[in-house]
Amino acid sequence: MHIEAIYDQGRLEFQRPVTLKHQRLRVRVEIPDQEIIDAQAPTLPTYELADFPAEIRDKVQRMTAIAEQARREALPASATADADSEEAQQRWAAVELRNASRAEQGRMP
């Protein structure tokens, strides 16, 4: 159902009375682009690996090597047989999105 409402300082005011079954529910809100102020995402600090003790550098290099090896290795036969299903493709897309997000945040994928 489509219902018109006005946003007023964090609250939605319906244009006509509406009685809802539940006190809390998920809704979809459409906001015109010109009403949104583009705020830049906060940037995370960057660090030079050389600034850390040798023990930490060694662990990071080992983890990076493991991640690279995992990316290069072929999937097991059972995973490749399932790779054609839509559900499997969605799962892999979610994993790739999570890894990209972690990389953006400066965390290892």
Image (tube, rainbow, N blue to C red):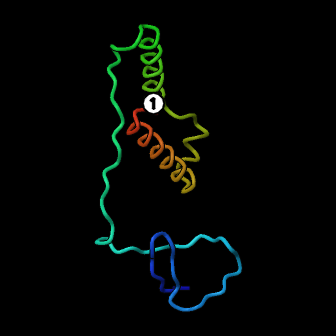
Q: Is residue 23 above or below residue 49?
A: below
Q: Report the quarter where the N terminus lies.
A: bottom right
Q: Position of residue 13 (x, y in %)?
A: 51, 81
Find disc 1 in the rendering and name its residue.
108
Of residue 109 and residue 75, the one placed in the foreground of this image is 109
Furthest residue toward top: 54
Taking the image as shown, residue 40 lies to the left or right of residue 10, namely left
SS class, disc 1? loop
Q: Position of residue 17 (x, y in %)?
A: 59, 91
Q: Residue at point 48% right, 86% down?
A: 4
Taking the image as shown, residue 1 lies to the left or right of residue 32, namely right
Furthest residue toward bottom: 16
How many labels sit on residues? 1
Q: Position of residue 91 (x, y in %)?
A: 54, 49
Q: Is residue 37 above or below residue 61?
A: below
Q: Position of residue 86 (x, y in %)?
A: 54, 57
Q: Amino acid at mark 1?
A: Met
Of residue 68 and residue 40, the one placed in the foreground of this image is 40
